[in-house]
C-alpha cells in the first residue's frame, strides 16, 4: 500500500482488501490494566511491562477497532 502524490499522477489506489481492513488503536499497559475483557496479547504485554527497565510501545487492541476505509 503506497500513497503517492497527485502531482504527477503516481497515486496508487487501495486494493479491495485494504479498503475493508480495520485500523486498530495502539494501547499501553495502563489501558490493558483497566480493560474488562483482557486478551492474551494484553496480558503478556502487562507482564512484560512489569519488569524493571522495560520499554514498551503499546499493542494493537482488537476491542478498539476503528472504521474501515471508504
Image (cartoon, rainbow, N blue to C red):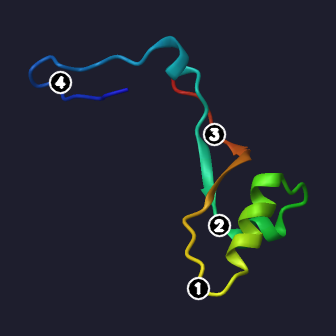
Residue 16, position as x, y percentages in the image: 51, 12
Q: CA distance from mark 3 to mark 4?
A: 26 Å
Question: Sequence order check: which comes first, mark 4 or mark 2?
Answer: 4
Q: Nearer the viewer, mark 3 or mark 1?
A: 1
**Which residue lies most toward the bottom here?**
52
**Dot 2: element:** loop
**Dot 3: element:** loop
Q: Residue at x 70, y 82 (%)?
A: 51
Q: Residue at x 58, y 85 (%)?
A: 53
Residue 26, position as x, y percentages in the image: 60, 55
Q: Nearer the viewer, mark 3 or mark 2?
A: 2
Query: How busy is the neighbourhood of tag 3: few (under 14 within 10 Å), some, or many (20 plus)?
Result: few
Query: How busy is the neighbourhood of tag 4: few (under 14 within 10 Å), some, or many (20 plus)?
Result: few
Q: Which residue matches tag 3?
A: 66
- Quadrant in the rendering for residue 9: top left
Q: Which residue matches tag 2?
A: 28
Q: Nearer the viewer, mark 1 or mark 2?
A: 1
Return the mark for residue 53.
Answer: 1
Residue 3, position as x, y percentages in the image: 29, 29
Q: Which residue matches tag 4?
A: 6
**Dot 4: element:** loop
Q: CA distance from mark 3 to mark 2?
A: 17 Å
**Which residue lies most toward the right here?**
36
Between residue 47 and residue 23, name the one nearer to us: 47
Q: Nearer the viewer, mark 4 or mark 1?
A: 1
Question: Sequence order check: which comes first, mark 3 or mark 1?
Answer: 1
Amino acid at each position: 500500500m503506497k500513497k503517492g502524490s497527485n502531482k504527477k499522477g503516481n497515486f496508487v489506489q487501495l486494493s479491495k482488501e485494504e479498503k475493508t481492513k480495520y485500523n486498530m488503536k495502539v494501547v499501553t499497559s495502563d489501558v490493558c490494566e483497566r480493560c474488562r475483557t483482557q486478551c492474551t496479547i494484553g496480558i503478556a504485554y502487562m507482564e512484560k511491562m512489569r519488569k524493571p527497565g522495560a520499554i514498551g510501545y503499546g499493542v494493537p487492541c482488537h476491542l478498539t477497532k476503528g472504521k474501515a476505509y471508504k
